[in-house]
Amino acid sequence: MQRFLSECLSSTNASEVVIHLYTLPLPDADRYTAASKSIYELRRLNHYQTMIAHNQYIASFASIEHWGTHTYLQHEQRPIHTSHTSERTILEKLLKKELENTARKTHELDRGAFRLIHAKKVGMKELDIYPAIELSFYVDENGGITAGFDYVHRFEYTQNLQQLLQTQPMQSVEAAVVDYTNYRKYEYTFIEVANYTAGEESPYLKESVLQYYERTKKFSKIKGVTPDSLVVHVKDRQGNTFPYLPHLLKLRCAFDSLPNYLRKKATRAIKLSPAQKMPALFTEALQLLGNLAMVTWPKHNTLAENLGYAVKELSAPHLQFQDGTTNMNIRQGLRKGIYQPGTAKVSYFVDPQLDKQKVGAFIRILQEESTKLGVTLEPSRKPKELRTKIEPTLFHLEELSYHLKELATYFEGTVVVITSEAASENAYTQIKREFGGKQDITTQFVIFDDALLDTTKAHYTYLNILLGIYVKSGLQPWILNEAMHSDCYVGLDVSHENKRHASGIIQIVGKDGRLLKQKSMSGNEAGEIISWETMKDIIMETVHAYKTTYGEVPAHITFHRDGLCREDLDQMQHLLSSMNIRFDYVEIIKNTNRRMATHANKQWYTEQGLAYIKANSGYLCATSPKEFVGMAQPIKVVQKTTEKPFNEIIEDVYHLSFMHVHSMLKTRLPITIHYADLSSTFHNRGMINGNTRHERSLPFV
């Protein structure tokens, strides 16, 4: 049995790699832009040899001969000092830039990923999907050079911008576009269709677009272009506007921006099993790395043990359900009923266009299934007063949110919104924003179709619907049977959407995995950093919530940070030590650019609970999906403090991934991070009330 990780440790140490390092003078004492302002012209003057800029330095693997009007203070030819973080970063960037330049014959650079020029695309009517390799370098303090890699997919619309403009107008709609004919796939913002053609003079070029390409001998760009062809205006990231031929551009295509129907098709097309992914990934990645002449990459250095990791198999926890019943299987445990039985007040808000008899049958089944789980759904009578007061097309109205302002008083408890899939596209956001964000009413959406009336096939769906209702009603479906290693856990996240930043918290979870409190404590944060004022409030809320529940302050708190830690841990240490509370701060990295897999008996597969550990960090595979679903995506866990042993830290992360109590679906993230992520996103979209009274429920799932 062999355990693999999609990274490779070079047999070349950084101490063996000689670079040319130039120190530039500081203009206006700004060391962060000193080199970057010079690099573009220096590349042009030196036949585009590989060089990078970092702070006050420019580095290259070869001497930079031509400097033009630029000067430098010092030139050193030596290996990097591996004890210096900035010099390790310089070598990492230089290796990546060298690979970008040397791999041009075989690969295109597509939004930072290396795409085989002759890659076999996955074709759809509207989309072309290309596999690509996302690759990064890491140099450690001992000079070890590691390359991490994973397959990603790049999406292109089949129509170019010119074809699109022939079918739909885009006179002055800003949209992201990509020059798909360029090696680097440069991105721009479409501004407008120009009021002149390719054969007429452009005010930006002082000549026609055709004349420009003829003069610069780029004849392939104007193949098939006539003097009457369209011209568009685009702007780059620096805000510069210039003309472009629309047949060279396509709308930028990203998975998250695809319409739902295309996203479903694309998901099915790109899923790869471990057997399909791992051999091909290792072969292509190592071939790609072979373009670097100054370092070597042995194939056997993709084994976890050769990479310096200790392999640990974590055990799944026992979960506790009604009357102390324990089980490791959620579905089997729920047969005995949920951990916290009781009554849940609900109001049914039904799309008037649905068949009333069928919806009535669904509600009866829902209530019967809930009774089996130990919870009585108590319907409110208030919504009945609405029967003559709402329009048949209410859920389809663009101004639905206006009508909801008057309807809020007719609901109590958790509102179960029952609608069709088509109507939900219009209704979901408006109802969540008005009821959730403004009225502080929790809602559970149900997409109704006739299949729900067949309980033999829809039992799993009923369980998911009911779990959603329970957690929004403050009921705990299950807990961990064995206590974890910390007294409580706090999930921290900063959501960034549409240039708005908000710290989404708080998921305060007890040592048995139950929710103690959730609150969207958000201020507008500076980028990804949670300000000290916000962090101080979070700590106070955490300690208070724990003391309210258990009658004492916690002895130890573990903070889970979504992404990299940028907070001041010394300030946290000072405050918490004054309260006699110890703490650990742990990064949870969701997108690791890594895959973990086991190879045995000529088979590739993933193992749930498998961890690769090195010092105070490790990779964790918390799921093992069926092959048709695709391959498990690991997370990276990094401990920034030293209170608890790392083995306990990563085990708790794994056990918290079993506590997504709103769903039957096992996910890869601990609930601290998953729920904090959802909370901050809902807050930024105005779907959750900042002063919610539902602090023991989950309004954002």
Image: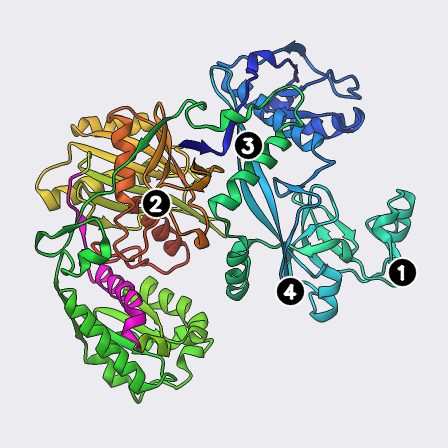
Residue 82 visible to an observer of this rendering:
yes
Which residue bears the numbered disc 2? 669
Quarter the C terminus occupies: bottom left
Q: Along the horizontal axis of the image, is 288 left or right of 241?
A: left
Separation (CA) of disc 1 from disc 2: 55 Å
Question: Do tag 3 and tag 4 residues touch (Cβ < 8 Å)?
Answer: no
Mark 2 or mark 3: whose residue is earlier in sequence: 3
Measured Cα–Cα span from mark 2 to mark 3: 23 Å
User: Which quarter of the figure has residue 443?
Assistant: bottom left
Q: Which residue is mark 3?
A: 136
- Residue span colored magenta: 454-483
Are there few (<14), some (14-19), or many (20+) residues within 10 Å of tag 3? some
Is 463 included in the stretch rendered in magenta?
yes
- Residues 456 and 89: in front is 456
- Between the C-alphas of marks 3 and 4, the distance is 33 Å
422 or 22: which is nearer to us?
Answer: 422
Q: Mark 4 or mark 3, which is nearer the start of the sequence?
A: 4
Residue with the mark numbered 4: 125
